[in-house]
């Protein structure tokens, strides 16, 4: 048996043991969701936290995710290579960032087991490093044209168009290209605006300010809880603001372990994000979350989590750490433990008939809890600029009922040209289109 197979087997056994332990403790607690979630006490899992991830299977011919009542889903584009993030251009063209996590050398047995588990789930491997342009010229809800807009990138993720400039968030920095409306290929050399450290959480989401003067980027942490020292986390676990005129970059908000999706809420004009919280404290502890992002705000990582709950695994004696805990902002809305909420977009009222305004969220799905969570697209209703009610499913069916295989995993979500929603599915290699039933 190869080392990879052995580690995968050990990871599976660890997952089975965690499930058995969970059953001994009684019924599975409800998910920590909403503005006032019930969060179980932290139970540190030690050096080898739970590892459980379904094997990536993909979709059978004709198989579709499950749309909630009143909605229907079709494949907007198939045959992609790990599509992660989406952006819609003014002419209705859709750009898709195709990229994959490429881990460095593992530092521990746990890292080795994690890599083996993620490889089986098609979560790591050689990255396509491409942005593909999809065009639905006849408006039938299926992209009949496909073009390689940009190639040879470095794990691209976020995209933004401001004026005649197309910005890309590579894992190692933001780059810019000249863009001509209707273009299907960009051959101009990149212009680098800033650099980011590689490694760890690799995605770099982008969102332009409404006035087009600032570009916001989500930069995740290197580690789970600053394991290698906080000096290695400099410039990470934050959202940065990049001034497009001067090129100056500054931290906009910090203490965000892995902020991914970014969106504007139009009533208040506030920036919102979804954040993946830390591992190793239990299935529901702490929950991932959706929150308004305050300029200069600190959100707890790594010293504390929801409502200033101190993480005893992180040294707290330093006066600076204590001061940060004292001013840590409690997030607005819990999304359940380890749902891996990545995608985020604002949905105006009526995007689907009868639905209010709110946020659509792509939940990529857990890999480190005894009962899997996420693996769906959900909607959080808003009123007066803030969450107002329980989440509602938009799209499910990505995970087999026995949790052993996944057909797909949703990531980026955007409003579709012509109405509805587009969803990037990186395991299924599909972009799905969700619209109202006719």
Image: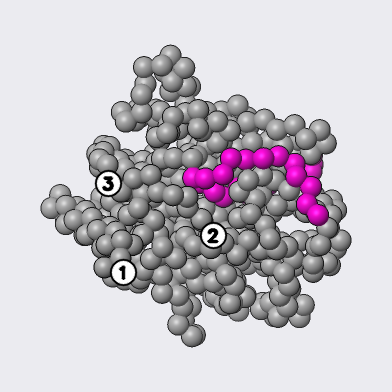
Q: Mark 3 or mark 1: which comes first in sequence?
A: 3
- Please say if 349 is above or below 274: below
Mark 2 lies on residue: 100
Main structural element of the magenta stretch: helix, strand or loop? loop
Separation (CA) of disc 3 from disc 1? 21 Å
Whether residues under marks 3 and 2 lie with C-beta atoms below 8 angstroms apart, the answer is no
Mark 3 lies on residue: 48
Q: Callout 1: few (<14), some (14-19), or many (20+) C-alpha neighbours within 10 Å?
A: some
Which one is in front, 412 or 70?
412
Q: Mark 3 or mark 2: which comes first in sequence?
A: 3
* Residue 192 part of the magenta-drawn span: yes
Secondary structure category for the residue under label 1: loop
Q: Which residues are the magenta region?
A: 189-213
Secondary structure category for the residue under label 2: loop
Mark 1 lies on residue: 404
Question: Which residue is drawn at the image coordinates 27% and 62% (left, top)?
Answer: 6
């Amino acid at each position: 048996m190869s080392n990879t197979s052995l580690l995968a087997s050990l990871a599976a056994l660890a997952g089975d043991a965690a499930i058995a332990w969970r059953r001994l403790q009684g019924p599975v607690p409800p998910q920590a969701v909403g503005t006032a979630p019930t969060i179980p006490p932290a139970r540190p899992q030690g050096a080898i936290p739970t590892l459980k991830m379904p094997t990536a299977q993909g979709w059978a011919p004709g198989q579709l995710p499950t749309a909630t009542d009143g909605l229907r889903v079709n494949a907007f584009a198939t045959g992609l290579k790990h599509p992660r993030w989406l952006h819609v251009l003014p002419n209705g063209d859709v750009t898709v960032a195709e990229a994959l996590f490429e881990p460095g050398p593992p530092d521990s047995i746990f890292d080795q087991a994690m890599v083996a588990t993620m490889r089986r789930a098609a979560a790591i491997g050689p990255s396509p490093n491409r942005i593909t342009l999809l065009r639905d010229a006849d408006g039938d809800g299926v992209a009949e044209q496909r073009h390689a807009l940009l190639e040879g990138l470095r794990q691209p993720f976020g995209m933004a168009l401001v004026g005649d400039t197309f910005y890309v968030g590579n894992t190692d920095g933001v780059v810019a290209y000249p863009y001509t409306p209707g273009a299907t290929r960009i051959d101009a050399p990149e212009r680098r605006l800033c650099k980011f450290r590689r490694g760890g959480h690799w995605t770099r989401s982008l969102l332009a300010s409404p006035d087009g003067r600032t570009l916001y980027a989500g930069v995740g942490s290197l580690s789970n809880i600053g394991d290698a020292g906080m000096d290695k986390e400099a410039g990470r676990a934050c959202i940065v603001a990049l001034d497009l005129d001067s090129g100056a970059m500054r931290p906009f908000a910090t203490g965000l372990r892995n902020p991914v999706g970014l969106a504007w809420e139009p009533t208040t004009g506030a920036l919102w994000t979804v954040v993946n919280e830390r591992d190793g404290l239990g299935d529901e502890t702490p929950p991932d979350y959706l929150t308004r992002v305050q300029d200069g705000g600190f959100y707890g990582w790594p010293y504390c989590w929801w409502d200033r709950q101190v993480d005893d695994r992180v040294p707290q004696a330093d006066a600076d750490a204590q001061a940060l805990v004292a001013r840590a902002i409690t997030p607005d809305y819990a999304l359940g433990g380890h749902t891996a909420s990545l995608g985020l977009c604002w949905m105006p009222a009526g995007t689907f008939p009868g639905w209010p305004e709110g946020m659509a969220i792509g939940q990529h799905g857990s890999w480190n809890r005894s009962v899997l969570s996420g693996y769906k697209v959900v909607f959080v209703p808003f009123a007066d600029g803030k969450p107002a009610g329980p989440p509602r499913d938009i799209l499910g069916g990505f995970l087999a009922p026995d949790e052993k295989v996944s057909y797909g995993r949703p990531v980026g979500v955007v409003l579709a040209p012509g109405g509805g929603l587009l969803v990037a599915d990186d395991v299924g290699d599909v972009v799905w289109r969700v619209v109202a039933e006719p």
